[in-house]
Image (cartoon, grey):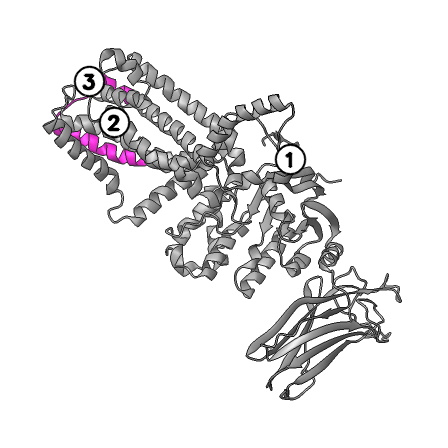
Amino acid sequence: MTTLTEESVNVPVFVIRATTGWRFLDLQELWDYRELVYFLTWRDIKVRYKQTVIGAAWAILQPVAMMAVFTLFFGKLAKVPSDGVPYPLFAFAGLLPWQLFSRVISESTNSLITDQRLISRVYFPRIIVPMATTMAAIVDFVVASALMVVMFMYYKITPGMSLLWVPVFVLLMIMTALGVGFWLSALNIEYRDVAYIVPFLNQFWLFLTPIAYPSSMVPAKWRVLYGLNPMTGVVEGLRWALFKTGTGPSPMLAASVTISIGLFLSGIAWFRRRERIFVDMIGSGGR
Amino acid sequence: MPTPALRVCGLGKLYKIGQLQKYKALRDTLTDAMSAPFRAARTLVKGQPTFVAAAESEFWALKDVSFTVNPGEVIGIIGRNGAGKSTLLKILSRITEPTEGSAEVHGRLGSLLEVGTGFHPELTGRENIFLNGAILGMKKAEIKRKFDDIVAFAEIEKFLDTPVKFYSSGMYVRLAFAVAAHLEPEILLVDEVLAVGDAAFQKKCLGKMSEVAKGGRTIFFVSHNMGAIAELCSRAILLDHGRQINDGPVATVLEHYSRLNNSQGSQIDFTLDPSLPCCILGLRLCNQDGVDSNSFDINDEITIFITYRVSVKLHGLQLTATVARNFIDVIHSFDTDGMDEIPPREPGLYQARLAIPKMFLKGGIYSVRITAGTPDRLIQDFEAALQFEIEELSVNTHMKGYRRDRVGHVILNDVWQSSRLE
């Protein structure tokens, strides 16, 4: 429903009418609403930490606990290789992006439902809702990353120039998370089955991603196929940038990047197409 | 001619009943997809489509609504439940898209469809002001600038840093309205916000709204409170079953609306409920000649007869008649108003008579509410039990202050005296 023209008297004129078909993001509008993204993110973080006893420490505690379990069972007992990197560090580098991703998929799915009162009463670009969920997860990611720096110092590892690639893979991670988040949140409005699939999807996906093990364990001929999981590229890319080990730029990584971009763009397109009926599907409690 | 603030052309919203269903399960979509080829095959074989009539599962919540609003107008949207009022506001505030037609909005549009939207119980008053302001479309700098005004208006200074979950409902509503009231869009949509809070605060809200209106902003106001509509709005649009059936000066449209609800005749009978200590059996309206009617001239005396049976001896029994014009109560009267003390009522059949003098009520549509009760118990309550109309047949009211479409509800004739002093 968007046609924005500027009148001579500088009063914005907006025409509301039925729209059809596919459309991309309205970047100008998103920019205008940037403060709302900030406030919704801020709300998510604030509320979560207000309701918990140890607050922000959860952001670090969760990946650390996972790292401890992985180190004990996979590193020490199962003797899973870790491409020459100390296993705890190796696992932690994988767990950081994984925690973000796993949080985004589980929380995005219900994000529109959680905020249904908002959606059915005020207009704003709906895509802001799953975006804010992702932003809140990114804040936790940044907090937990601080521990990564400490671990580097503990193991006396000096990262090389490839460290400059870290932002690129962080971006790839965010794009993947957003893409999946857009899909799941939009689908869950129409098919509530999604909310039941996601916990399973979350576990399933963890094993398909090289978190506890390196992708070098996967036979070379299967690697491109393995790379179709976009999180493979994110995790292996990050490890490569941090430790200069494992698989750097490779056909596997290319496969992941392609899928990631595809998910991101198609997620936006699907969300924008279906958002027209969100409020009609949710209803508004008799109002 | 000024540029309109809003131009609505043939707006319509079609709902499919299936769409209104809470959600569909993946299963339904799958079975739909599976059965589609079979349906197609059946069509092919039988040679005729097997579509079910679509009309049954669709309805227009809004249809062919068109109007133009000039800047500074305050417009009431009225109609019964399900008339399409909320759907109209939802389309205008872009929450949902119309199915057909268009609306051209000139300027920033803010909506107040429910106060406190987006308030989070865990956050403090201060935090919620910022969150809610941002949700309603205010910039952070704007909220900061208005922060003190908002807090002062809401009267919550002391509790600014308390989570709102500990607020009383009154404080909560005050804060929510305060944030919304400080939104300064060119066009403001307001839905039922005045249904909340205590009388003093409601008055404050009304004051704030008329202040906003006087500042040249356009306001759309949806409410079941016709008194508020009559007080705030200059113009009203009446919706019924999704159609726009009247658009004009607020008094005229309110009258049309009361007529819409008016189906009774001049007499109504009720069945005896033996379990009640006192039971109203019938109400009757007639003029000074004793002729039953519900249509009077301003020079007619209007008499309301109330027949009731008392089955046990009652102390302090009172009948109440409340007469409202355009949903504003004009007369509130007890049958015991003329007595020094209320006499006990022995069991028996009674008739009470209330005579409204001629040249007292202005032309208009009136509804009568009758109740029976004792000071500590309301026994019966008949809201809008009777309706009548007073017409200006015998007087040319053109130059009179009490002409039907002017403000006010009662006539004071021959009360003025002017004399030349010099």
Q: Residue at x 58, y 75 (%)?
A: B378
Measure how far apart labels 3 and 2 are at the Cα level.
13 Å
Which of B177/B156 is in front? B177
* Magenta highlight range: A139-167
Q: Is residue B356 visible?
A: yes
Location of residue A230 with respect to B223 vertically, above or below: above
Where is mark 2, residue-wise? A207
Residue A164 in picture, x, y percent from top left: 27, 20
Give the prevailing secondary structure in the magenta stretch: helix
Instruction: Assign a secondary structure to mark 1.
Output: loop
Q: Is residue B140 left or right of residue B242?
A: left
Location of residue B229 with respect to A210 vertically, above or below: below
Q: Amino acid at mark 1?
A: Ala
Q: Amino acid at mark 3?
A: Met
Q: Quadrant of the N terminus of chain A?
A: top right
Q: Is residue B337 left or right of residue A144?
A: right
Residues indicated by labels 3 and 2 sit on the same polypeptide chain: yes
Q: Is residue B84 left or right of residue B151?
A: right
Where is mark 3, residue-wise? A217
**Callout 1: residue from which chain?**
B
Residue A81 in picture, x, y percent from top left: 14, 21
- Identify the disc placed on residue B53: 1
Q: Amino acid at mark 2?
A: Phe
Residue B230 included in the magenta stretch of the image: no
Q: Is residue B412 visible?
A: no
> Which of label 1 and label 3 is nearer to you?
1
